[in-house]
Amino acid sequence: MTSHGAVERLQLMLDDHVENFGAIGVIVGIDLPDAGRICLTAGSRAQGEAALGASDLFQIGSQTKTFVALSILLLCRDGLLDLDDPVVRHIDLPIDGRITLRHLIMNTSGLPEYLSLIDPTSAGRMAPRDMVIPALEQGVLFAPGQQFDYSNTGWVIAAMVMDATAPGGYAGYVKERIFGPLGMQDSWVGSGYPEERLAQGYLKRAGRPAISAARGFSLAWAYGAGDIISNCADMLDFYRALARPDNPLGVTMQDMTAHWALPAEKPFHPLSLGAAYGFGLERRRWGGLEVWGHPGRTVGYGASSWFVPSTGAIVTTAFMYVEDESEPPHIAAQRYNPSMLFTQVLCTAHALADLLPAAVPAPVPVAGNR
């Protein structure tokens, strides 16, 4: 197969997601070291609108957590925080005094899930504190540090710590210390983005027409856990920078994966299965190879980015669809099947790497000790 043939086959797969699975739009990007990058699209920016463009924006969902973890590490490097600081040292919350910043950004806090206690579509501009208090009142599911178990609650709290300690607060700090140095001009925290460039995911409730999930309600409910807007090029630039030891941030993929935790045999959160967790990054196996990165979901959106240490390849995906609350869950799960999409894109990246061996450097070590 030629490199052109590998890309053509991936394009056909993306078209299939639109034609047969009901996706509104799909964006994927592949970056191979020293061999450039590709960004492919299928579908429309919104129902009845123009074709989706490679530079269009999308909600990155829980990939936001990687930016928050990186910010906490930068604040620690600058002496404003310490990973082993108890959270209560920085903000006034009724939280278990054993929980540290390290626990928050490694998903080892034991905190229960706040999203099971609120409805994101009706939360409006609910204050972060008000969102997490109901979860904190339930205590912890296990002793902090005992295991990795996915919890969005800890990331809202981590952003609150940034508001209390970082110059410019959570949003301002990410913009000035990450987006700025990396030239990520198409990325925003929560709001301020050009709405006409945002690809649309949708929410449909029984007996009602589908509404735009982007225009229908605020992302305030995802504060620190999933409220960043970006695009294909910026996400590839972000991961490529993390993979380079000389990046302008001074924190690398190796720093963020030097320590990691494993889930229990029977974790509380299903997203914990099959993964290990470092500082805001997951370790998984997609397409037969170890990868580090993060998936993300918000209402009507699915996204992910992954780095392959053995080849240096980076991939990113975005999927916009109609999230229909009346559809049976086992059917809805097939409309956006992340395992299938991620594996398809990564297998294409692997094929391209094999076709361009001179462009692939020696393996990059990232995994460290638990």
Image: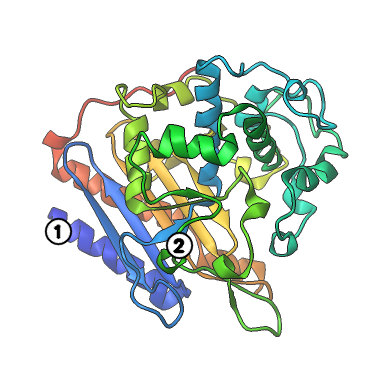
User: Which mark is drawn over residue 319?
Assistant: 2
* Residue at left offset 54%, top offset 31%: 69
Question: In x, y percent, where is residue 343?
Answer: 39, 51
In screen coordinates, is 282 left or right of 234? right
Q: Quadrant of the N terminus?
A: bottom left
Q: Nearer the viewer, residue 304 or 165?
A: 165
Image quadrant in which you'd find residue 17 = bottom left
Question: In x, y percent, where is residue 172?
Answer: 53, 39
In screen coordinates, is 298 left or right of 98? left
Q: Is residue 105 above or below residue 79?
A: below
Q: Which residue is mark 1?
A: 4
Q: Quadrant of the C terminus?
A: top right
* Residue at left offset 47%, top offset 49%: 188
Q: Nearer the viewer, residue 127 or 349?
A: 127
- What amino acid type is highlighted by mark number 1? His
Secondary structure of the residue carrying tag 1 is: helix
* Residue at left offset 21%, top offset 64%: 8
Numbered label tally: 2
Secondary structure of the residue carrying tag 2 is: strand
Question: In x, y percent, where is residue 156?
Answer: 67, 40
- What amino acid type is highlighted by mark number 2? Phe
